[in-house]
Image (tube, rainbow, N blue to C red):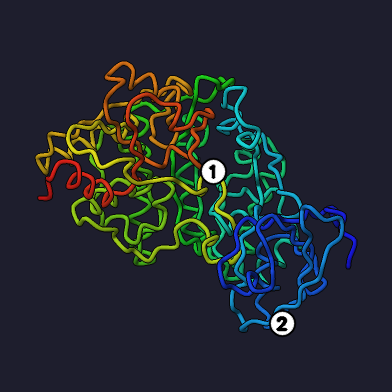
């Protein structure tokens, strides 16, 4: 037996949250709630290292039961590369590398007080970038990190660029390392690491000529970038930054024009469009969205780029598009990695078999677009209601940031006894950002997957309309 302390050299023991039936772990006697102490004598720092360790065909795994003071060693034989068959409660076992930037536009600084502590965590950890598609600024990146990323081919990564002018970037991030950390981007790209970039555009700060230079640098200095998503600043009523404000219609239109021109240059240079403006820019500018083909393989769809056109296409097809894009991170392919953050498990599906009138609740951006789809197929038994986001205020109008408080108010104002459809993107483990759950809402609530094909299936199931 081996003494277990719960923490070795500052590394927390991950807790087993799921055991696959009849897997090597199940056969060996690992149970939910057990703590994973070491594998073949090594204490893994994160789930990436964990996967590399369990690829062997013979393992000595030390685990500790929550009810025992001592740990025990299990000897496990399995196929080479065969999954061990467990999931753990965390992706990072040492300590998540938090962000030491103080960006003016950071939405975490714009959250109201009193929310769950986890919502205020700012990470700048390249491991979470690889696993989940989180964007990192690279300001806390080190030589050891670069060696690991290159040696282990931790690709793709997702990098927040914002500006390539060193003074502007340092000012935006309020961190002197912001002006130099893009040197890591040069090194990683040179080493063949796939990287997707992001630029958050702040009106009057990094737009105009600065944005143009940033995008041109992405085609020249950083020409190996796989893609660049240009997204607008999000502001809430809780922001204390005087320089941060929403885009005007004219400013959004100017960003679209610039991004399109540079994107056209990308097509001429590389034979593909690598730079796009987010759907939100088009909605703010009141301009029509480009066709689905404009977004090629939907590389940045999870960043709100081509999201509506893909939703629309899935609605018409009645099934997912099946694009082979990288999405955001590879946590699903890492044995043991838990769904985390906005990728946490969602609860979907009809809550009952009711047919007939129902109301789809969504944000003000999506509402007219969804209503247009329903009108196309002649669906009159489903209506769309806008949930105005008073909780955050500002220009927050996306469905993913709807909170229980605003949803409950909207339902009570309409019909507290009615049936309502809610997109699952607003929930994380059945909880809204304000802490409320579906059970706290009035009316009959049916949570549906935020996919065009799911909406089409519901149109048919609830109303019989299928063409």
At x 20% / y 57%, what residue is drawn? 317
Q: Residue 43: x percent and y percent?
A: 80, 65
Determine whether, in the image, residue 5 is placed left or right of residue 105: right
Front-most of residues 161 and 113? 113
Query: Would residue 309 be visible to someone looking at this image?
Result: no
Whether residue 227 is visible: yes
Residue sitting nearer the eye, 357 or 31: 31
**Measured from the top left, where is residue 239 in percent x and y?**
56, 22
Coordinates of residue 443 in the picture (x, y in percent): 33, 26
Location of mark 2 (residue): 58
Q: Is residue 329 left or right of residue 406?
A: right
Of pointers 2 and 1, the one earlier in the residue sequence: 2
**C-alpha gap between disc 2 and disc 1:** 46 Å
Residue 329 relative to residue 378: left or right: right
Read off the residue under disc 1.
162
Q: Secondary structure at mark 2?
A: strand
Q: Image height check: is 281 above or below 411?
A: below
Compared with residue 377, is residue 339 higher up or lower down, i.e. above or below?
below
Kindly identify the residue that appears in the image at 68 percent across and 38 percent down.
101
Q: Residue at x 65, y 70 (%)?
A: 25
Quarter that holds the N terminus? bottom right
Q: Residue at x 47, y 33 (%)?
A: 233
- Can you tell which quarter of the image residue 65 is in? bottom right
- Give the crowd class for mark 2: few <14, some 14-19, many >=20 residues within 10 Å: some
Between circles 2 and 1, the one closer to the viewer is 2
Q: Check disc 1 and report its element: helix, strand or loop.
A: loop
């Amino acid at each position: 037996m081996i003494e277990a302390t719960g923490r070795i050299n500052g590394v927390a023991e991950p807790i087993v949250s799921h055991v696959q039936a009849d897997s090597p772990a199940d056969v060996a006697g690992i149970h939910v709630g057990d703590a994973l102490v070491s594998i073949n004598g090594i204490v893994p720092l994160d789930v990436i290292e964990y996967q590399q360790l369990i690829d062997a065909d013979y393992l000595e795994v030390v685990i500790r039961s929550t009810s025992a003071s001592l740990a025990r060693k299990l000897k496990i034989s399995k196929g080479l590369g065969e999954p061990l068959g467990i999931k753990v409660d965390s992706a990072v076992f040492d300590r998540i590398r938090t962000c030491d930037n103080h960006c003016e536009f950071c939405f975490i600084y714009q959250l109201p007080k009193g929310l769950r502590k986890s919502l205020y965590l700012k990470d700048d950890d390249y491991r979470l970038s690889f696993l989940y598609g989180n964007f990192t600024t690279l300001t806390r990146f080190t030589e050891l990190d670069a060696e690991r990323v290159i040696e282990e081919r931790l690709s793709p990564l997702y990098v927040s660029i914002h500006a390539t002018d060193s003074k502007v970037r340092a000012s935006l991030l309020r961190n002197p390392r912001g002006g130099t950390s893009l040197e890591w981007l040069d090194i990683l790209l040179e080493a063949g690491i796939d990287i997707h970039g992001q630029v958050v555009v702040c009106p009057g700060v990094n737009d105009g000529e600065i944005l143009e230079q940033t995008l041109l640098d992405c085609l020249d200095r950083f020409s190996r970038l796989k893609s660049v998503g240009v997204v607008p600043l999000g502001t809430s009523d809780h922001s204390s930054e005087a320089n941060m404000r929403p885009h005007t219609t004219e400013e959004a239109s100017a960003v679209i024009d610039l991004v399109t021109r540079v994107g056209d240059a990308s097509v001429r240079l590389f034979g593909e469009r690598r730079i796009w403006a987010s759907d939100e820019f088009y909605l703010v500018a009141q301009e029509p969205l480009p066709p689905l083909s404009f977004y090629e393989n939907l590389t940045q769809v999870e960043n709100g780029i081509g999201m509506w056109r893909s939703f629309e296409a899935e609605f018409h097809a009645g099934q997912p598009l099946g694009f082979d894009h990288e999405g955001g991170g590879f946590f699903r392919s890492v044995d043991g990695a838990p769904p985390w953050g906005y990728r946490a498990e969602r609860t979907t599906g009809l809550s009952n078999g009711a047919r007939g009138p129902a109301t789809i609740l969504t944000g003000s951006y999506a509402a007219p677009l969804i209503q247009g789809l329903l009108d196309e197929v002649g669906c009159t038994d489903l209506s769309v209601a806008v949930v105005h986001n008073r909780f955050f205020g500002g220009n927050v109008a996306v469905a993913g940031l709807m909170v229980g408080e605003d949803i409950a108010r909207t339902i009570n104002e309409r019909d507290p006894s009615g049936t309502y459809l809610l997109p699952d993107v607003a929930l994380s483990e059945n909880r809204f950002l304000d802490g409320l759950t579906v059970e706290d809402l009035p009316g009959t609530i049916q949570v549906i997957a935020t996919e065009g094909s799911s909406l089409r299936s519901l149109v048919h199931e609830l109303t019989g309309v299928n063409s």
